[in-house]
Image (cartoon, grey):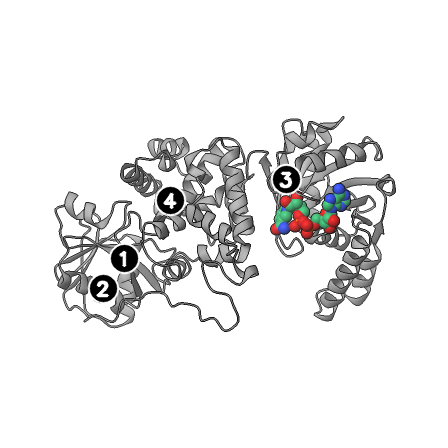
Amino acid sequence: MSQALSTQNVVAVIGAGAMGAGIAQVAAAAGHTVKLLDNRPGAAAQAITGIRAQFEKMAAKGKLTAEAALAAGARLQAVEQLADLADASLVVEAILENLQVKQTLFKDLEAVVSAGCMLASNTSSISITAIGAALQLPQRLAGLHFFNPAPLMALVEVVSGLATDPDVANTLFATAAAWGKTPVHAKSTPGFIVNRVARPYYAEALRVLQEGGADCATLDACCREAGGFRMGPFELMDMIGHDVNFAVTNSVWRAFFNDPRFLPSLIQQDLVDAGYLGKKTGRGFYDHSAGAVKPLSATVPAQVQPHDIVVYGTSNAAQALVARLKARNLSFTQAQASGDTVATAGSATLRVTDGRSATRCAFETKTPNTVLMDLALDYGAATRLAISVAAQCDRAAASSAIGLLQAAGFAVSQLQDIPGLIVMRTVAMLANEASDAVNQGVCDAAAVDTAMCLGVNYPLGPLAWARAIGIGTVSTVLTHLAQTYVEDRYRTSPLIQHQLFSAKVFS
Ligand SMILES: NC(=O)c1ccc[n+]([C@@H]2O[C@H](COP(=O)([O-])OP(=O)(O)OC[C@H]3O[C@@H](n4cnc5c(N)ncnc54)[C@H](O)[C@@H]3O)[C@@H](O)[C@H]2O)c1
């Protein structure tokens, strides 16, 4: 196992912007002398003043002793010339996101540092292989991809290009761990792990919005309250900024030679064209101007509580429904599993979506009064659930199904009859992308789940989520989506197919 870089070794950070300052803070807090360089005069010194203020704040909150804060602050040095970095054992670059500019910097740097000095780039989207191609010793270069804000976000992707020496990647991995981070290894492929696997979170929501499935506030509420995501996709895109989010989507899509999996959305293109970039411009999917009122999510008004409720089988949804009904002292009966039926109420049949529309499901199962429920991370704890109602379903039946879910304590959002509703199709596509990343050797299964939980705060890693709902369910949802859209976008990852046929769980 490789050792972490000793704290006796000097770390240099180039670029004193949002990321460089954060990385410098982390390395100084970990005990290294940190030299910070920026080509904007005064920027490094200004960043160091900011970092020292952060250390003081941490001391005031009792997270550091006053002496430790002072010592960490004293380990930071602003420098003005590349030549000042000659004694560095590791240089982390966090400058402009441009291949030529980064290549030039690293080439110049190679003339200054020792042959044993490791070089790292914090690039979010540029190939480490391509940056390394400009170097005399490309084996010493790896990606060290921190997330914003670097002092707070635990994840670091340690990215290996084609030429990266495994010892360098392993030393950087150990060093990131010694700095209090949770590193994961990744191969240098477009988007690395997080920026690739997260694409469906935005893409599926944009697709549902485009097809008129529901409005942004309703879809966001379902993702939060049923999916357990910290932020809904639209509020998250507004926070990230549509220019940034759209650029990442485009870059991943192009880098994969226009694979329809990553196809950007015209809706987001429009927002960018309009200058509606999200929170930073006061307008995105939502109005963020002062005094603007956030739209409410659409919630079906209270329906009459049905008295003939039957819950079938022991699926996650059925068990949670039983517990919720019991907790509310409602009368119902339980029955043996009957196909995929979760419950009946009046003449309505409730099932969890399997990627078909409710109308198709009603037709194929010869059950006209079909109402589909969305996936919930935890049906016991979810406060809201999306549903769709088959075109064949009569009003009274739909009302009974909704009344049952409301009686069980769910706020109900009725979406248009979109296949896979919102949480189910999103989770299936996240699991699909995570599976492809693993299948293509970008990272291992544990890394992809760690990366998505720590890099973008998902409540569960996509592969763990797939295991929890069943690989068979994920595969069925994807197959049905592929049948509906007849697009390569929904092709099932070979790894999911393999897992399905070998009946093994992801390890
Ligand atoms: N902002 C994020 O959320 C985020 C997250 C992860 C990775 N990244 C990556 O980190 C890098 C930096 O991003 P940022 O958001 O900190 O940018 P930023 O614009 O805040 O900071 C970049 C800094 O680099 C300096 N700089 C530019 N060219 C330079 C050069 N040739 N030599 C020295 N200094 C130079 C600039 O003066 C600026 O201070 C980019 O590669 C970006 O893709 C950004």
Which image quadrant for residue 129? top right
Which image quadrant for residue 29? bottom right
Identify the residue position indicated by label 3 in the image.
Answer: 158
Q: Earlier in the sequence, mark 3 or mark 1?
A: 3
Residue 240 lies, in percent from the top left, at: 54, 54
Is the CB atom of the residue marked by disc 3 within 8 angstroms of ligand 1's nearest atom?
Answer: no
Total number of numbered labels?
4
Label 4: element kind: helix
Q: Please tell me which residue is depicted at 44% across the width and 71% down the height of the picture.
A: 293
Circle number at residue 428: 4
Looking at the rendered structure, the kind of residue marked 1 is: Ile
Identify the residue position indicated by label 2 in the image.
Answer: 402
Q: CA distance from mark 1 to mark 4?
A: 17 Å
Compared to 344, does 173 lie above or below? above
Looking at the rendered structure, the kind of residue marked 4 is: Ala
Q: Earlier in the sequence, mark 1 or mark 4?
A: 1
Packing grade of label 4 (10 A; few <14, some 14-19, many >=20) is many
Q: Are marks 3 and 4 in contact (CB under 8 Å)?
A: no
Which image quadrant for residue 49? bottom right
Label 3: element kind: strand
Pick the front one: 151 or 195 = 195
Q: Earlier in the sequence, mark 2 or mark 3?
A: 3
Circle number at residue 387: 1
Looking at the rendered structure, the kind of residue marked 3 is: Val
Q: CA distance from mark 3 to mark 1?
A: 41 Å
Q: Are marks 4 and 2 in contact (CB under 8 Å)?
A: no
Compared to 411, does 175 lie above or below? above
Q: CA distance from mark 4 to mark 2?
A: 25 Å
Label 2: element kind: helix
Q: Earlier in the sequence, mark 4 or mark 2?
A: 2
Q: Are marks 1 and 2 in contact (CB under 8 Å)?
A: yes
